[in-house]
Each structure stands twice: as C-alpha cells, then as structure tokens.
Image: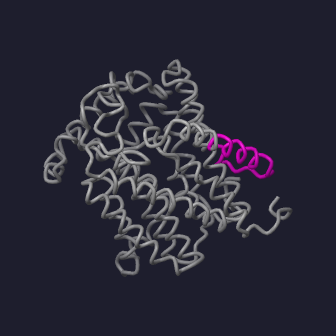
Amino acid sequence: MSGSLPKQNSSIFFIMRLIAFSAFFIPSSYAVPETIYRSWQFLLFCVAVMFFIAVLLRGKIYLRWVLFCSFFIAYNLLSSAFSGFDAGYETCLFNVARGIGFVSILEYGWSVDKRGYLKAFIGAGLIWCSVNFASYILFRDILGGMQRGALEYGKSYVTSQHWFFFTHDNGTVFFYIPVMASIFYYAERFNKRLFPLAYLFCILSELMYLDLSSTTALIAVGFFLLSCCLSTNGIIRHLFSKLNGCRSFNFGLVLCAAVVVLALFGNFVGVVSNLGKAGTFSYRLSIWDNAIKWFIHAPLLGYGLESTVTAVSKLSFNHCHNLILQLLYSSGLIGFILYVISHLFCLNVACDSKGQFGLNIVYSAIISYFIASIFDWYVYLVLPAILFYLLIPQDGTSINS
C-alpha cells in the first residue's frame, strides 16, 4: 500500500497526522466545555475506525496488533458485559475505540512512514503537553486545580491533588513519558539537533512534578532523565547492555508486584513516611487489600469498567492504584495474560536503532512507565503503548507475523 501513496513528507500529510494523534491527547471532561469534549470524542472515534480499517486493508496483520485489540476488548467489553456494563455501554465502547485506535495508528503508520508518523506524534505531544503545562501554571495555587477543590464523586469534600488539562498531577506522567521517550528516540535515530529540546522538555516536566510534590511522577521522570544523562557512562552502559525489551518489561511487572507484596507485609512504611506520603500510602494499602479480596471472587474476567459509586463501595476508591492489581481486578487473569503477551510480542522485534543509546532510551522509558504504574494506572491512558512500538522497524519486521 505504501508504494501507491504519494510522497508523505508534505505539510498536508503532517497536519493530518498531527490531528489524528491529537485526538488521543483528549483532556478530562472538566477541563473543556462539554461541546468541545464531545467533539473531541467524536474525532477520536472517527480516527480509530479509519485506522482500524486501514490496518485490515493493508493485507499484513501482525499477531501483536491482534493481541492488543483482544486485550482492550476483553478489559472494556467482555469483563464489563459479565458485570452488566456498570459504567455504561458508551464508556466501554469509547475505551475500546481509544485503545484499538491508538495501536492501529501505530501499526499502520509504522508500515507506511515511521519517521513521519513519529514526528507527528511528537508534534501533537508538544502542543498538548504545553497546554497541560499552561494549566499547571494557571491553576497550581488553586485547591484542586481545574477541579477547584471538588472531586467528581458527587461529594462536597475537597482534595489536595492538583487537577489539570489532562488529569491529576501524577496521572499526567502517562502523557509526558511517551512524548519524552519519542523525542529522545527521534533525536537519536533521525535528527540529533532535537536533543536540547528533549532534555529541556524532561527538565521542565521534572521541575513541575517537584513543585507539585508528585512523588511517583517525580521518581519516574527522574529515573528516565538520569538514565539518558548517564547512558554514556561505562557502568550504566554495561548495565543496559544486559537488558532487552522483554527483560525491561518483566522487570517492570515484578517491580509493580513486589511493592504491593512487600507493602502488604508491612515494609516500605518507613520509606514513604520519610517522603511525607505516609497517609496516602496507608490509604493505598487498604485499596490494595480490598482489590485482592474482590479479585478472588472473579479471578477469570474480573469486574470490567465500573461506575465511581460501585468502585468506591468495593475498593474505597475509584481504582486500584496499581497496574497489576487493576488488571486483575478489572479484567481477571484473561485480561492480565493478554496484556502481558501483547506487550511481549510487541517487543520481540528486530530492533530499529543505530546504537546502544537508542536502546537505552526505550528500556529506561519502559521501566519509568512501570515505576509510575506502581501507584497509578488507567487503561484509558493508552499513549504508553508507543514505548513498546519504538523499536519496531518501518516494515514491522517481527517473528510473530
């Protein structure tokens, strides 16, 4: 199909791709007027359908894409159907479109013009992350940020969290890390003049999280930035040379599980107390304990997407605050296995990188993603999927076609 298309480095193609990727940088519903939010949802749905069809018509379908699609269907539709679609049909279908649409645009884009699509993703990321940064500047001193002190649970109590254009402070890291990694990777692979921009973007993000005392995001971005800065060091380079994509992924999963297990056995309390997070950490312990108890009663399919009222009544919060527990609670063992296999198949590719630094970027970004996922993770924040696509060559070469 790529041979029949015109040369795709023109401004019109870049703008079209920029708009397509912008659809997946959708803000929270409280951040924009309802008309704009609904229009944004419609744009995302149209982009998702268009690229889903484009992948099917391409004539070459990879198992990793099928597994990714199966995961989003299992998590948002299958598990939710067995629970009576508690969150509503519209929410479930929209989350399916959001997940499948994003991996479809990556699948198709990588087969046609990887450099052009990656450039468009970076452009969209810089635009909308800048908007989120502007909302941080404007609302950082207001209790609750753009939520203006009220959580969206229909209750009157206030929150000390900051809510901005994308979502709350720690949640925004799932937008920022994919953009950071993509800029560094593009600079290493295609245009080294972008390295100053990459470091500037990372540093500004780290300063924002430092100012907001967003500990999880601060550690995740700090790890990534430090890895990039020290990647030329002999010892660090030697450590990363022992890694590959699958090992980074497995390490991240073990890290997420280990923190939960050790925490439930009474460890880490002293550490988080020193970080000034003892209160929120104790709350998470209660959430994790509740999630495990409920998972035991629905181990295969979990409970799917739930309304805030239902989730809070069972967990004492509206989500599990941990990637592994959220996967198990919401989609059961079936969803968890599909999540693991889809990502491992995505990483089992012929690496598209000129050198070790490019590999280090991807490996450290994957680990950073899992560091952030220890205490927060949301299935609808799909942008981190690009971290697992970065090393896939333009022709999609893989042993799992």
Q: Is residue 22 above or below residue 334?
A: below
Instruction: Please check the rendered image and state whether residue 49 is part of the magenta-colored stretch, yes or no.
Output: yes
Q: Position of residue 304 (x, y in %)?
A: 49, 28
Q: Quadrant of the N terminus?
A: bottom right
Q: Is residue 114 above or below residue 50?
A: below
* Residue 207 placement, left or right of 391: left
Nearer-the-camera pick, 229 or 200: 200
Q: Position of residue 191 (x, y in %)?
A: 57, 78
Instruction: Please check the rendered image and state whether residue 208 is part of the magenta-colored stretch, yes or no.
Output: no
| Residue found farthest to the top | 84
Q: Position of residue 288 (x, y in %)?
A: 30, 34
| Residue found farthest to the right | 4
Residue drawn where x is 45% and y is 60% of the image: 130
Region rendered in magenta: 44-67
Q: How is the image coloured?
A: one colour
Nearer-the-camera pick, 110 or 140: 140
Q: Is residue 296 visible?
A: no
Badge count: 0
* Residue 394 placement, left or right of 189: right
Q: Quadrant of residue 212?
A: bottom left
Taken as a whole, is the magenta stretch helix, strand or loop? helix
